[in-house]
Amino acid sequence: MSFKIQAAALIVAFLAFCSISQAEEKPSVPWNIHDTIGLPYWLQFSIKHRSRYETLDNAFRRGANGSDQVLAFRTTVFAQAAYENFRIGGEFIDSRIALDDTGTPVSTTLVNEVELLQAYLAWDSQDFLGTGLEAYAKGGRQTLDFGSRRLIARNRYRNTINAFTGIDFNLQETGNWQWRSFFVLPVTRLPNGRASINRGAIEFDAEAFDIYFTGTFLGLDNLPIQTQGEVYLYYLNERDTQHALTKNRDIFTPGIRWYREPVTGQFDFELETVLQVGTSRATRSTMDTTDLNHFAYFGHAALGYTFNYPWKPRFILQYDYASGDKDPNDGKNGRFETLYGARRFEFGPTSIWGAFARANISSPGYRIKIKPHQGLSVFLAHRAFWLAEKRDTWTGARLHDSTGQSGDFIGHQLEIRMRWEVAPKLATLETGWAHLFKGEFAKNAPGSPADKDDSDYFYVQTSLHF
């Protein structure tokens, strides 16, 4: 066992001891900056800061070797003023890193310094047009979370956050249904060139009508056997802009989800299936001008049970399938696109790890969750990963064998995470470890690292909410 893994185990044990021994000392009323400086009730104001140290041993990405580390910082400042049915809000974000080197996969997923994340005007009604329905509309720059968060999400683990400019409208009958529609321009984080990022250049993020994203979403809250459901349709149209090269995706994404929330002493489940049709290109290169017929699909299935015992143990069986491109020369693109979704909650940490994404994978697995004490949660997750199509790319590592001779088994990922809420809604400590047991494809694909040893990732982070 390496020194870093031993250190991770010691930190987990130490945090667990601290959480148990100091649990009674937690304040019953969370401290916050709003009340401390005496701001009026109609004005919300908060600051969040997160610092995370990460280290990776034994690379798995194409062309990479050795180890890597990064110290990532993310700070957000949020303010919102309300008057009658109207709200006006804004949020700034500053995401930056230290300790990186030439081998670190630096991009706008890690760095976005001094940027306006949100600036919006919102309107709410508890009795829309006298119907008794609740409604809200929000216009301007904003972040979005939809459904399972697999296709549209406000990023939590990643050091930067997706933003969109446009309008989001919601109409609902609480406890029965929710209908939501949006039309937005995805915001391109700038600067997006490595040289500019490395020298700390400051450039305002931008949006353009060359890329727009729209959709409609219906959530049903009162289905048989205490279940809920969702039906949705999203449409993404993009062309290269002065700020970003794209895959020129012109795709419709319909999907359906049916699930039952976890309840102690009962089985729960989740089923989600998604199709994609339209056109796209194989790469973002300016030399790639061929529009391919795009047909792809994704499926998720999970079955869980929460035991009525101390620590509330919960066991979950999971399976995910995201299609890949079967033949790189047939004029078709079969690789699933996860759009603006999050993946950390399903496939492990992202940042300098990010080994797996919702593209060209077939992955069964299980997850065990426990809550040993108030504010303390731990999970262990194990997944096996195969390529859905062995001639397509393992996107997390950018490894590809067009002949298919490297096989299709990527390997096993084992992950452990522990989160301790030191002070409710104020301070959280978190640490985690992920280990990739490399399979034949990870070891043998062209361009794979010369060191065939398994890969390890460890992180520890603090989050403060004022």
Image: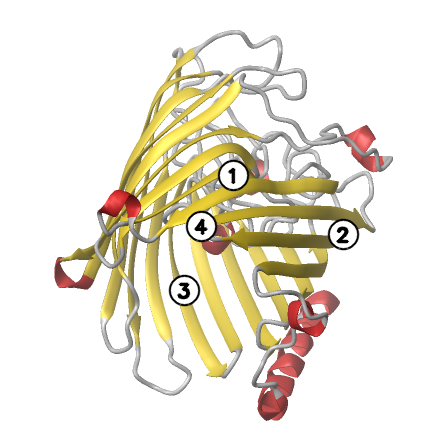
In front: mark 1 or mark 2?
2
Q: Are marks 1 and 3 in contact (CB under 8 Å)?
A: no
Mark-to-mark CA distance, 4 and 2: 44 Å
Residue at 60% in and 42% down: 118
In front: mark 4 or mark 2?
4
Q: Nearer the viewer, residue 136 or 459?
A: 136
Which residue corresponds to mark 2? 70
Precedes in sequence: disc 3 or disc 2: 2
Q: What secondary structure is found at the residue carrying circle 1?
A: helix
Query: Looking at the picture, which amino acid does disc 2 mark?
Result: Val
Which residue corresponds to mark 1? 441
Which residue corresponds to mark 3? 367
In front: mark 1 or mark 4?
4
Q: What secondary structure is found at the residue carrying circle 4?
A: loop
Q: Are marks 3 and 2 in contact (CB under 8 Å)?
A: no
Query: Looking at the picture, which amino acid does disc 4 mark?
Result: Asn
Mark-to-mark CA distance, 3 and 4: 43 Å
Which residue corresponds to mark 4? 85
Q: Nearer the viewer, residue 97 or 434?
A: 97
In the picture, measured across the screen, residue 412 lies left or right of residue 443, that is left
Q: What secondary structure is found at the residue carrying circle 2?
A: strand
In front: mark 3 or mark 2?
2
